[in-house]
Image: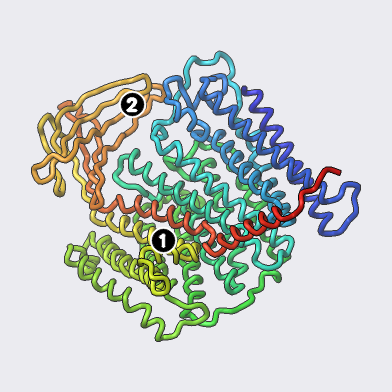
Amino acid sequence: MPTFGSFSLLLALALSGYTLLAGAVALRQLATGARARVTPEKLAETARRAGIGSFVATTAAAFALVWAAFNNDFSVAYILHHSNRALPGPYKFAALWSGQEGSLLLWAWLLAAYGFVLRLRHKVDVKLTAYASTILAGIQVFFLLLLNFAAMPFSLVGGTVPQDGFGLNPLLQYPEMVIHPPMLYLGYVGFAVPFAFALGALMMRYPGEKWIHITRRWTMVTWLFLTCGIFLGAHWAYSVLGWGGYWGWDPVENASLMPWLTGTAFLHSVMMQEKRGMMKTWNVWLIFSTFMLAIFGTLLTRSGLVSSVHAFAQSSIGSWFWAFLIIVLSVCLFTFILQRDHLKADNKLESLVSRESSFLFNNLVLLAACFTVLWGTLFPVLSEYVQGNRVTVGAPFYNRVAVPIGLFLLFLTGIGPLLAWRSSSFKSIRKNFVLPCIAGLVAAVVVIVCGVHPWEIFTTDGQGSFYAFFAFVLAAMVVTAISAEFLRGAGVISRHTGQGLLASMVQLTRRNTRRYGGYIVHFGVVVIFIGIAGSAFNQSKEQELGFKESLNIGPYRLECQSYSQDSNANYDTEFALLDVYRGGKKITQLAPEKRFYIASQQPSTMVANHSTLAWDLYVIYAGKNPDTGQPIIKVFLNPLVAWIWIGVAIIVFGTGVALFPNMTAALAASRNRVQSAAVADALPARGGD
């Protein structure tokens, strides 16, 4: 199987190389009108089929590596270091992306899969798709060169083959790690498709905005995958790392956030190009930057540039990624300079109080957030280069800068839908802003009564309360603004049709799925902000608990019923059984544990969490006191964390709604199909010639 896998990778490289070269030659011939023995159309078709073949070959290589993991083939060095016989089946599958070589193979396979779908849909726009296909082939060649010559997943073990492997990293032996990395990579890799279309459209001076319409769904699906990947990673960190939080501004966490920020900016600003023919240069560079930041994120985990719990071991392939980034940036700059006159805006900004200006400010704020994260991530490297010693940037820096930026974004989320295109009159502003402002004032009174005091910013630890206060107030304003948009449109439909308000809302959403799906996504973002604001009021307590001893935190009392040990073929474990009481009544039993994995000889924490809408009771088994032999229990009371995960579910739903075609378009398509079928039935049947 290793030989088969290696051969498949070589074949995939040859086919991708042919797709790149033949596609480039065919496009050149079409551009210049040069004559050749083989027509450019036929040459482009062979390139397309070779690209499809490269997907088959890459799939075969990925299958070979997974097969080796499930069959405990420890003659393959990668399997030896990332699997063992006692490893459960789902985690053997996850071994594909648990190490550097396997994760690069996953990158290449997903890219090939995206290219496969693109090449099957080539008739949407044959010439533009040919450009995009050729560019994707160039990216694929880079990753396949890596897999064949620098990070080979099928390298064999020298000498005697061990009877068992070293096992999977304990941190990865958690259910979410079976889906979190693929989701993240689907986002990273997927941005290559809109990047390829944007670069191809610029190269060929594509007329109009059709390339945006073609790539809109690609971009939205990719953005959704990246969003899910980021929050699955946050939930994994919350459940496994055992530090009581879900986001620590780790460099690799930051690496996933940066392309998400620029991708979000792109999704918003393309509306300006579609509606008003504006921000064309912005959009091109936003998608260029998003793709390059995705590559940069992949580089961070492999080069040893930064230290992170998520990063792979330091290796020499970082230089490969730097070279690739330089090539990509050079191509983008050269194409932009050559074709920049093609990106002239059709219209100019007419008023600062307009929907166009809200999109512009939205872009500026998102880019400011991205730059902040990038600066903080690279500051240790830059400080070491300049001063000779590495200065680490921690969470306080990011919170001081990123939290105000986030609150301003939340504000823009609310006011954007209330502004008209081109210019908004004072009368319309006053009319649209009355309800949100009232809601904000009511929310301010409520949160102050509940004990959230903005004036505590002047105390030592009151900054969190200050930001939380404004987060709750702005959230109330945005929810009111979004609800008003739904109610206003649904009211009109209800008056004309006589149907109920809820049914009218559904019909309203189906008439413009992109707009109202976007509002639902914004509502999900607000819910996430509410969940994040709760972190300002976290509590924690650590205590040694013997048999029948108890610990109190907030409204809860935890009583230790027992503490014991257990073992299986994969790991040994220590755990405590804790009864949880509230108001004198037992509500649940929690069992936090500490595992020690036999194959890797590494420990891992398994958090026990009782989650409600109000707060999470988050319990960690921190080990035993060596003097008394009794367990040490650390407890966090984290308010509103569940709202974060609910907000993500709302974002997924809203994006799904936005991806559906409008009801009028769907009905028209259905009507056309019926008419076509009727015409076909009416035509006389033809006999054979």
Is 295 on the left-hand or right-hand side of 51? left
Q: Is residue 300 visible?
A: yes
In the picture, the disc for residue 596 is 2
The amino acid marked with disc number 1 is: Ile
In the picture, the disc for residue 222 is none
Q: In this orientation, which residue lies closer to the viewer: 175 or 6?
A: 175
Which residue shows up at 38% across the image and 78% down it? 432
Secondary element at tag 1:
helix
In the picture, the disc for residue 520 is 1
Is 27 on the left-hand or right-hand side of 449? right
Question: Where is residue 511 shown, x and y percent of the image?
Answer: 49, 65
Q: Is residue 675 above or below residue 604?
A: below
Q: Give the distance between the C-alpha atoms of the residues marked 1 and 2, in whole angstroms.
A: 44 Å
The amino acid marked with disc number 2 is: Phe
Q: In this orientation, which residue lies closer to the viewer: 619 or 523?
A: 523
Q: Is residue 540 above or below residue 354?
A: above
Q: Residue furthest left?
A: 584
Which residue shows up at 73% across the image and 64% down it? 205
Secondary element at tag 2:
strand
Instruction: Specify which label sits upstream in the sequence, 1 or 2.
Output: 1
* Quadrant the N terminus occupies: top right
Nearest-to-viewer mark from 1 and 2:
1
Is 43 on the left-hand or right-hand side of 335? right
